[in-house]
Amino acid sequence: MNPASDGEPTGRVRTVRGDMAAAAIGRVAFHEHLLFDLVLPANRGSVTDPPITPENRWQIDYRSNENRNNARQTDPGVAAAELIAFRADGGDLLVDQSTGGLARDPEGLRQASDASGVHVVASAGTYCADYLDEETLSLDLAALTARFVREVEAGLDGTTVRAGLIGEIGCSWPLRPFERRALQAAARASRITGAAISVHPGRHPDAPFEIAAILAEAGADLRRVVICHMDRTFPGGERVRELLATGVNVEWDFFGIEQSHYWFGDIELPTDLQRLALIRDLTAEGFGSRILVSHDVCTCTRMTRWGGHGYGHLLRNGPALMRRAGLAETDIDQLLRRNPLRHLAFADPAPLQES
Ligand SMILES: [Zn+2]
């Protein structure tokens, strides 16, 4: 398989229920969280925050990081119901990018996939250092690489459920020593397994460039790397072309967040149509095959059960918005199906010589 090509997807995708042909898969939500806990471990104890109700859901959603009940969803039954809604919107496969530290639940993902019939891909790797235990933080590069490879080839967290993607690898700003090792381990594990890499960059405009350099030096094929969160890192599209010039792929994954207020910092977020205007321009410039779109749902208020847009917003409302932005039908299919499947299809292993 040529990972840089832009035709019908070929190769195999690794779901929580087994491997399958990429060509047999329909539309994809590439960067989501189905079962997760985004509350920092130090704050996870007994939670007395109010439960989400119709009366308070707007305010909880507006300041999404504050109510801890909003930042976790650990019930496979709820996940299955959300997947059934996703399927009704035309969704066929969803990637849960909850990596180590985010209460990753591989068996729960398999249950939700079984119950809904929607394909689910689980993720190898680790999230930001603040979410990790001392034992994980102490792993050296060789041990971390071995863990990531095992997660793809044998199973995640002591289960037989295998990962189909490495990441989102969590990076802070400034980058922590562990996170640098995790990027290097992801590069090596990607070469060994053929799985692609997804990276959550720190919230500084220089972060994606530092990450691309570390991955390249560690031997990653940057055509198999997706840098997430363009929406908040370059809200007006600043430096996206400079980032594309490094060889990586770029992802807008805040679709459905139609408010300017960003709860994690002093940033004015774009709307869906503003995201799509940037994507249209980049597509016209020939970058269409290197763009990923998703919702990165990681709060309850964005799920249908709690009055949110759900995992199907891009499928339900996206095509009309994309046409309005000036994208063609083939561009829409590329964004919603071909691009994510090309990253999910495993490349041929190409391990580096150990130095
Ligand atoms: Zn995410």
Image (tube, helix red, strand yellow):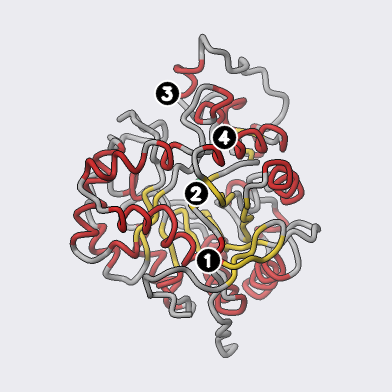
Residue 185 falls in image quadrant: bottom right
What kind of element bears circle 3? helix
Query: Does residue 97 appear in this view?
Result: no
Between discs 1 and 2, the one toward the N terminus: 1
Between discs 4 and 3, the one toward the N terminus: 3
What kind of element bears circle 4? helix
Instruction: Tell me how far mark 4 sits from mark 3, CA to CA.
Output: 23 Å
Q: Which residue is mark 2?
A: 29
Location of residue 279 in the rendering, given as x and y in whole percent from the top left corner: 26, 52
Location of residue 177 in the rendering, given as x and y in whole percent from the top left corner: 53, 62
Question: Pointers 4 and 3 in contact (CB under 8 A)?
Answer: no
Left or right of 325? Residue 343 is right
Instruction: Tell me how far mark 1 sits from mark 2, CA to CA.
Output: 16 Å
Q: Which residue is mark 4?
A: 85
In front: mark 3 or mark 2? 2
User: In the figure, 133 relative to 43: above or below?
Assistant: below
At horizontal 25% and vertical 53% (from top left) the residue drawn is 328
Amino acid type, callout 3: Tyr
Query: Does residue 295 appear in this view?
Result: yes
In front: mark 1 or mark 2? 1
User: In the figure, 215 relative to 42: above or below?
Assistant: below
At horizontal 31% and vertical 58% (from top left) the residue drawn is 330
Q: Which residue is mark 3?
A: 62
Instruction: Tell me how far mark 3 sits from mark 2, CA to CA.
Output: 23 Å
Location of residue 50 in the rendering, given as x and y in whole percent from the top left corner: 61, 15
Amino acid type, callout 1: Ala
Between discs 3 and 2, the one toward the N terminus: 2
Q: Is mark 1 within 8 Å of ligand 1?
A: no
Q: Which residue is mark 1?
A: 23
Q: Residues within 10 Å of mark 2 (few under 14, many from 20)?
A: many
What kind of element bears circle 1? helix
Residue 145 falls in image quadrant: bottom right
